[in-house]
Amino acid sequence: MKKFILSFLFLGAMLSPAAAQSTITRDGSARLLDSYRAYIGHDDLYNSKGERLELPWQIIRQDRANYHAYRRRDRGDQGDSFFSDPANRQRLEVMLASGTITDDAANDIVRGNIWIKVDIYGRGDIGEWVDVHVQE
């Protein structure tokens, strides 16, 4: 499967030009900060207002909010220390735009009922990008 780096097309209306310019590019000095496995279930597909989420980053972010803030966890969800901080969850959109995900994985996440593995990379305690993989 061809991997792609998510573009800022879906970010256009949500980020200012200054924010887009501040996106960090990958280099060899970043390291794996955290990694977790999670099931994307029904509750992860809807925000707290009951609106259906349509983008992979929104769904992954909701999964982490459900896990850390609302204690709505799917059986087998793993914890992580990085997204326990609400500010880090807020950055997920930019981090996924700087990371990798296959087209198929993005579509599977939007459909739900799928296992994912998320690898979080950065420097110190600053996350820079996430790589997302669908798992069996």
Image (spheres, rainbow, N blue to C red):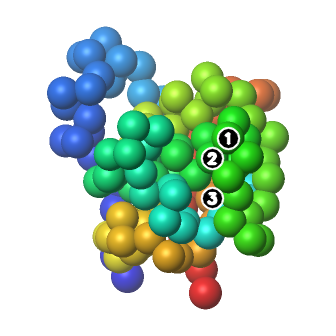
Rendered location of residue 66, percent (x, y): 63, 46
In the rendered image, which quarter is residue 78 located in? Answer: bottom right
Q: Residue under label 2, please give it.
A: 66
Dot 3: what SS? strand
Query: Which of 53/103 is in front?
Result: 53
Q: Which residue is depicted at the point 54% across and 66% down?
A: 40
Judged by depth in the image, the label closer to the viewer, 2 or 3, is: 2
Where does the C terminus fall, quadrant-wise? Answer: bottom right
Rendered location of residue 48, percent (x, y): 47, 39
Dot 1: what SS? loop
Q: Is residue 52 left or right of residue 127?
A: left
Dot 2: what SS? helix
The answer to whether residue 53 is above or below residue 104 is above
Q: Amino acid at mark 1?
A: Tyr
Mark 3, other Cα within 10 Å: few <14 / some 14–19 / many ≥20: some
Query: Which of 51/92 is in front?
Result: 51
Q: Which residue is depicted at the point 61% across and 41% down?
A: 65
Mark 2, other Cα within 10 Å: few <14 / some 14–19 / many ≥20: some
Q: Residue under label 3, please give it.
A: 118
Q: Residue under label 1, please give it.
A: 70
